[in-house]
Image (cartoon, rainbow, N blue to C red):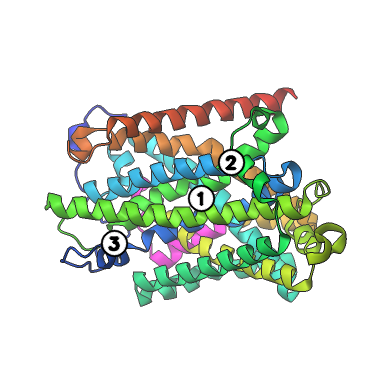
């Protein structure tokens, strides 16, 4: 990194200029009115924490280890809340997104390298969305996987249409789809009648989590829960509210309500992820080792040999509907982030429709290759999905390190808005712990 920290200044190009400072906020002090006005960006961030990549890892974790890994979901969610608070604050205070701020403090070569890593992380996220969407279309309508993958490309054009309607409309649609996902899994968990005392025990961390199998699944859950691309996204869309960026009181107000919005929405994502794991534990623990694909989960929900007396076609259909909703939600955030990192790191200026299409096509290629080689063998696609989530966990520190560094600096954030000491300490501890866990995973993979 360059030592010329003082040279950071707001760039001429606004992050996501189409939506920058386009949402009006109240001028009065009403808490509820302000919370409603600032609510929305947190929902777009939260969908990344409940995308299809979470489903196999969370439900699979429940099927293999019961409620053991609920503690990992809780830890991941707490880390996510901390990081997204920093991310939103960085955007509001500096009027730059994380990619722009990183580019300001690094040379062209390093910025290009970091852009590649960010794009790979988005690709890994998009892989989960493409696979989830294609499989949902296959389960609901019988569309072959290869055709379903092609259809997901058109999601980008749906996003372009939504952008014309205004950013608040996008936020409302995302919240609606989150509601669908939450309802489906809450209903299915209630029907499954899980063991409540065992669930509470699952939130207590245990040494068993560090064993090879559990560690791999744990890192998959962390990678699927704490998403690197969300740090870039939140630092950008937190600037969509129209405030006077020269007024310290307005900045403080925006940071306060952005934090409320983020924590509320991430609490909902935490609840959904717990429901996923609880569903896997309640229905499939002890006889669900072969439930490693979306189709097998879909079929198991209507098979009394797996789901017992609660099995029904309704449960499996609701599962597929939620999967489709999750894929559509994540498409919106993934394509927006592709634009943010492309403009922020390398200042590549191309038409928005082409930029989003290129981002999507880059992500679709590995899935198409896999589908072409293995046909409708969904297990191959799901293996690709799981490894993409582990990659996200490995890529996360590359986004975390500059984020914690920037938001802890008084020269960048100012004395009023820099991280408190305990926030900085927690940020660095989370980064170091995750790096150590990733190193342990690599060693175990190579030597076992």
Secondary structure mostly taken by the magenta-highlighted segment of the chain:
helix
Magenta-highlighted residues: 339-361
Would you name the residue on which mark 1 appears? Answer: 122
**Secondary structure type for disc 3:** helix
- Asked if residue 76 lies left or right of residue 112, the reply is right
Disc 2 and disc 1: Cα gap in Å?
A: 30 Å
Q: Quadrant of the C terminus?
A: top right
Label 3 or label 2, whichever lies nearer to me, is 2
Label 3 vs 2, first from the N-terminus: 2
Instruction: Name the residue tied to disc 3.
Output: 240
Q: Residue at x 70, y 29 (%)?
A: 212
For the point 65% across and 28% down, the residue is: 210
Distance between mark 3 and mark 2 Cα atoms: 36 Å
- On the picture, is 290 further left or further right than 219? right
Give 132 or 190, whichever is nearer the viewer.
190
Does residue 15 appear in the picture of this structure?
no
The numbered disc on residue 25 is none
Q: Earlier in the sequence, mark 3 or mark 1?
A: 1
Q: Earlier in the sequence, mark 2 or mark 1?
A: 1
- At x 61%, y 60%, the residue is 130
Q: Which residue is mark 2?
A: 203
**Foreground disc of the pair 2, 1:** 2
Q: How many marks?
A: 3
Q: Secondary structure at mark 1?
A: helix
**Percent x, y of residue 242:** 21, 63
Q: Is residue 71 above or below residue 432?
A: below
3D distance between C-alphas at marks 3 and 1:
22 Å
Q: Is residue 423 above or below residue 40?
A: above
């Amino acid at each position: 990194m360059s030592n010329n920290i003082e040279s950071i200044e707001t760039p001429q190009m606004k992050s996501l200029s189409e939506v920058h400072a386009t949402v009006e906020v109240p001028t009065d002090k009403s808490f509820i009115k302000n919370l409603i006005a600032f609510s929305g960006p947190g929902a777009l961030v939260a969908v990344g924490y409940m995308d299809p990549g979470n489903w196999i890892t969370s439900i699979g974790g429940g099927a293999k280890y019961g409620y053991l890994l609920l503690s990992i979901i809780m830890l991941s969610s707490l880390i996510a809340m901390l990081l997204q608070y920093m991310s939103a604050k960085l955007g509001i205070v500096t009027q730059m997104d994380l990619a722009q701020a990183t580019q300001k403090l690094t040379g062209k070569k390093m910025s290009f390298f970091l852009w590649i890593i960010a794009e790979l992380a988005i690709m890994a996220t998009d892989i989960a969305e493409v696979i989830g969407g294609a499989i949902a279309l296959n389960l609901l309508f019988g569309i072959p996987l290869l055709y379903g993958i092609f259809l997901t490309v058109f999601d980008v054009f749906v996003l372009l249409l939504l952008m014309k309607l205004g950013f608040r409309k996008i936020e409302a649609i995302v919240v609606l789809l989150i509601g669908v996902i939450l309802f489906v899994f809450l209903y299915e968990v209630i029907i499954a009648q899980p063991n409540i005392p065992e669930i509470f025990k699952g939130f207590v961390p245990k040494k068993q989590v560090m064993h090879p199998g559990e560690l791999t699944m744990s890192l998959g859950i962390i990678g699927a829960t704490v998403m690197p691309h969300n740090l870039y996204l939140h630092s950008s869309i937190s600037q969509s509210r129209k405030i006077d960026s020269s007024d310290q009181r307005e900045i403080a107000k925006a940071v306060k309500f952005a934090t409320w919005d983020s924590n509320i929405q991430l609490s909902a994502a935490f609840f959904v992820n717990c429901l996923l794991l609880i569903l896997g534990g309640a229905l499939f623990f002890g006889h669900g080792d072969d439930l490693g694909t979306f189709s097998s989960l879909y079929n198991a929900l209507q098979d009394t040999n797996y789901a017992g007396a609660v099995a029904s076609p309704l449960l499996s259909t609701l599962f597929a509907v939620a999967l489709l909703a999750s894929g559509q939600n994540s498409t919106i955030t993934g394509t927006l982030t592709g634009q943010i990192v492309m403009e922020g790191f390398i200042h590549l200026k191309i038409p928005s429709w082409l930029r989003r299409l290129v981002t999507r096509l880059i992500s679709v290629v590995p899935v198409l290759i896999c589908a072409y080689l293995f046909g409708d063998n969904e297990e191959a696609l799901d293996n690709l999905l799981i490894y993409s989530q582990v990659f996200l966990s490995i890529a996360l520190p590359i986004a975390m390190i500059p984020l914690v560094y920037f938001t802890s600096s008084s020269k960048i954030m100012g004395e009023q808005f820099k991280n408190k000491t305990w926030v900085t300490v927690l940020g660095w501890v989370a980064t170091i712990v995750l790096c150590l866990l990733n190193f342990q995973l690599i060693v175990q993979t190579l030597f076992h």
